[in-house]
Amino acid sequence: MPSYLETTVDKFIFRVATDRLYSAEGVWALAEGDRIRVGVTDFLQQRSGDVAFAEVKPEGTAVAAGDEVAAIETIKANVEVPSPVGGAIADVNPAMELSPEVINQDPYGQGWLAVIEASDWTTDRDALLDPQAYLELMKGQAEEEAKKL
Amino acid sequence: MSPEVRKVMVVPCSGIGKTYGTVSREAAYEVTEDLRPRSTQLVALSLLVLGDEEARAAVRAHPAVTIDGCKLTCAAKMVQESGGQVAQGIAVLDVYRRNRELKPQGIAELNEGGHLLAHAVAEEITVIVDDLVAREEAPDHA
């Protein structure tokens, strides 16, 4: 069970799990050896809205860092999820097919998207943000969003 | 309102400015005005929010079918807050998941997919309404 950093913007509370790294686009990467579990952040899922469908690239697909690893359709938008790491997709969350709403319900846990067998985690890791840095970035993004409301 | 004739209350969410809210309301209109006008009654969520006694009495006295456009489920919550019971809650998103070809777009004016999705929601509600009415009319209904 990860612990969380938390920030409030307008009426919204956003959490950032402290046990993983983040891309600026709101995708997390949790290292499990050379296998990297990826998913979307609490901020990204809240900003995007209720998930209708989530399609993850199939197992065996090679992705570079920044390539689309999943496409999520929500009630508000179509969201392309860029992979935070390069490698081959080793596992896809089966829940995405029948109950993609777990992305909204548990973005840092049951709502994971895929596990990627990293080809160069050491290099990719350096391009990611630690939880505190992501929290600050995300807070700025959330404040920009709040101005539009 | 004539609760002795109209037996099932249909309560759509407000969802003003939201596509799925528009689908919710359009489905409610279709059920109450076209598909089952004799056995249903539209109850405006805003009246429940305002505490309108007639609307509250209607959902307390009759089974309610709620239609919600998002996970906040405002319609279902307000029926319960008003002392009523939700006989069945419909989530527009769930209907869309079963009918992916009906992607709704637009707010003030829905696209074709939105109209068709509203119709699919309305069709699902009529099945529920018919079942509820049959139960209400059953001889052993308490």
Image (spheres, grey):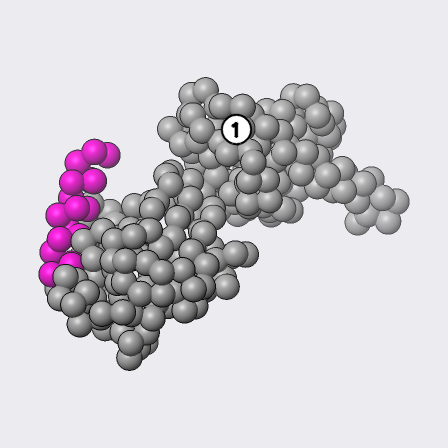
Q: Residue at x 38, y 41 (%)?
A: A78
**Residue B119 position within the rendered picture, expressed as x and y whole percent measured from the top left:** 62, 29
Q: Quadrant of residue A119?
A: bottom left
**Residue B70 position within the rendered picture, expressed as x and y whole percent measured from the top left:** 45, 43
Residue B70 sits inside the magenta stretch: no
**Quadrant of the image containing the N terminus of chain B:** top right
Say left or right for A39 vs A123: right
Quick one: SS at disc 1? helix
Q: Which residue is mark 1?
A: B114
**Viewer-side residue, A28 vs A83:** A83
Does residue A123 appear in this view?
yes
- In the rendered image of this protein, does residue B8 appear above or below residue A32? above
Q: Which residues are magenta?
A: A133-149
Q: Quadrant of residue B133?
A: top right
Q: Dot 1, how many residues are within 10 Å of its Cα: few (below 14), some (14-19), or many (20+)?
A: many
**Viewer-side residue, B66 vs A4:** A4
Q: Residue at x 55, y 45 (%)?
A: B97
Q: Residue at x 41, y 43 (%)?
A: A74
Residue A146 sits inside the magenta stretch: yes
Q: Residue at x 49, y 31 (%)?
A: B104
